[in-house]
Image (cartoon, rainbow, N blue to C red):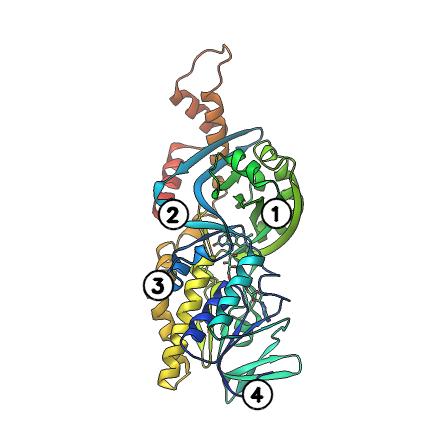
Amino acid sequence: MAEEQLTAIVVGAGPAGSTAAYVLARAGLEVLLIEKGGTPGSKNMFGGRMYSHALDKIMPGFWSQAPVERLVVKEIITFLDDGRSLSLSCQDAGWLSAHSFTLLRAQFDAWLAAKAEEAGAMLACGIRVDDLLIKEGRVAGIIAGEDQMPADVVIAADGVNSIIAQKAGLRERAPQPRQVGTGAKQVIKLPGQAVSQRFGLAEGNGAAQLFVGQCTKGMAGGGFLYTNRDSISLGLIVNARELQQNKYRISDLLEEFKENPCVAPLIEGGEVVEYSAHLVPEAGLGMLPRLCGDGILVAGDAAGFVLNLGYVVRGMDFAIASGAAAAKAVIAARAAKDFSQRQLGLYRQFLKESFVLRDLEAYRGAPHFLENPRLFTTYPRLAATLAGQLFTVDGSPPEHLLGKILGQMKKGGLGWGQLARDGWKGARQL
Ligand SMILES: Cc1cc2nc3c(=O)[nH]c(=O)nc-3n(C[C@H](O)[C@H](O)[C@H](O)COP(=O)(O)OP(=O)(O)OC[C@H]3O[C@@H](n4cnc5c(N)ncnc54)[C@H](O)[C@@H]3O)c2cc1C
C-alpha cells in the first residue's frame, strides 16, 4: 500500500468518511479512504431519508446527479394501538425544493465515495483497520493486518461501534445498550406505480411515515416506512436495553409489524429483497466522546452525532457536516504544520459553526425525555382510541369530547397533572 507519508487516512467510507475525504482531496491534500466492505455502502444501512441541507452546502444541487430515490413531499405520523390507529399527514410546498430524499445506502454511499475519488482521494475497499499506529505518544497512522500505513492524521469515521475512537482513547468503551437503538429494516420491492398510488404521490415524489405505540410493544422506539422508486423501506428501531430486558428479537417484532392492518396493505404483493440490522446512537451529547487527540479526529456515528426526536431521525446530515468539519480542521492543521490535539481542537469550533453541536445542544434534553414510557404506551393508545370513538356512530348514548377524554385518561391511569407535566417537558425538549 501507500509507501509515502499521507496527510490523512480516513477510516470508513460511510457519509462521514467519504465527505471528509472529498473535502480534503478537493483542497489538494493526500488522503486515503479505507473501507472494510467490498464496496462503500455494501455493509451500511439506515431507515431511508436524508435531509439534503448538509450535502447541498458542499455539493450544491447534488441530487441532480446522486442516486436519490424519491423527493419526500409527505410526512405521516401514525399512533398505533391494538386494532386502532390515528394518522396525521402533513405536506408543505417548501419541501418541493429538495428538502429531503429517500435513498438506498448501497448506491448512495458508493456514489459519494466515487465523488471523493474523482476529487483525488485514494479509495481502498475490503480492508479492515485493526489498530492505530502510535509514535511518540501520538496517532501516526493505522494498522490493517500486516500493513502499517503512516499519516499525519487519522479521521475515525467507522460508525457507531468505532474501534478507532476506542483505540485512540477518545471513547472508553463501546456504546452501552441504553445509549443505542437496535434497528432492523426490510426493503420490499413493488412496482413504482403501486408505491405512488398507495401513498397518493405524483411521480418522483415520496413519503416518510413514522409509527409510535403498539409496534414496539411499549418499548422506547418506533416504526418507519420510506418510499423508494420501486420499493419500500420498512423497519423498527427499539432501545437496545429495553429489547434485551424484555427478551424480544427485533426481527420477530418486524415480522409482526408487517402484519399490522396499517402496514400490511401498503406492502401487499411486495417481495423482500433485503434485510439488515444496525445500531443507532441515541444518547446525543450524553455519549459524546473526546472529539480529537494528537493526530486523530472522530466524526459521524463514531462520535454519536445522531438526533432522534421521535418525529425526526437525523444521522446522515450530521455525518456529512461533521466529516466536512473534520476535514476543515485537518486543512487548517496542515497549513499550520501542526497536527496536535490543541490545533485539531478547531474541529469543535467548526462543528459549532455548522449545525452539529448547535442542534445537539439545543435538544440536549430530548434523549432523557424520550425515555418516558407513556410516550410509547399511554399517549398513542389515548390518541388512537379517542379518534376511534370520535368517528364511531353505533346508537350508543352521546358523550361530549371532554367526557371521552376524561374516560380514556382514567382508563390509562393518567391525571391532568401528569399530562400537563409531560406536555410541558415535551414542548421544551423536542
Ligand atoms: C435503523 C436505522 C435507521 C436510520 N434512519 C436514518 C434516517 O432515516 N435518516 C438519517 O439521516 N439517519 C438515519 N440513521 C442514522 C444514519 O444511518 C447514521 O447516522 C449514518 O449512517 C452515519 O454515517 P457514518 O458515516 O458516521 O457511519 P456509517 O454509515 O456507519 O459508516 C461507517 C463506515 O465505516 C466502515 N468501517 C467500520 N469499521 C471499519 C474498520 N475497522 N475499517 C474500515 N472500515 C470500517 C463501515 O463498513 C462503514 O462503511 C439510521 C440508522 C439506523 C441504524
Amino acid beneath label 3 = Ser
* Mark 1 secondary-structure assignment: strand
The nearer-to-camera label among 3 and 2 is 3
Quarter of the displayed picture in which ligand 1 can be seen? bottom right
Task: Point out the tag, 1 or 4, that comes first from the N-terminus.
Answer: 4
Labels 2 and 1: the sequence-earlier one? 1
Q: Is residue 253 shown above or below 124?
A: above
Q: Visible in this render: residue 413?
A: no
The image shows residue 180 at horizontal and vertical percentages of 54, 56
First of labels 3, 4 by sequence position: 4
Q: Earlier in the sequence, mark 3 or mark 2?
A: 3
In the image, 1 versus 16, the foreground residue is: 1
**Amino acid type of the residue that numbered disc 4 sits on in the rendered structure:** Glu
Beta carbon of the mark 1 residue lies under 8 A of ligand 1: no
Is residue 186 left or right of 67 when viewed as pictured?
A: right
Q: Of discs 2 and 4, which sits in the foreground?
A: 4
Say the numbered circle drawn on residue 354. 3
Ligand 1 lies under 8 Å from the Cβ of mark 2: no
Q: Nearer the viewer, mark 2 or mark 1?
A: 1
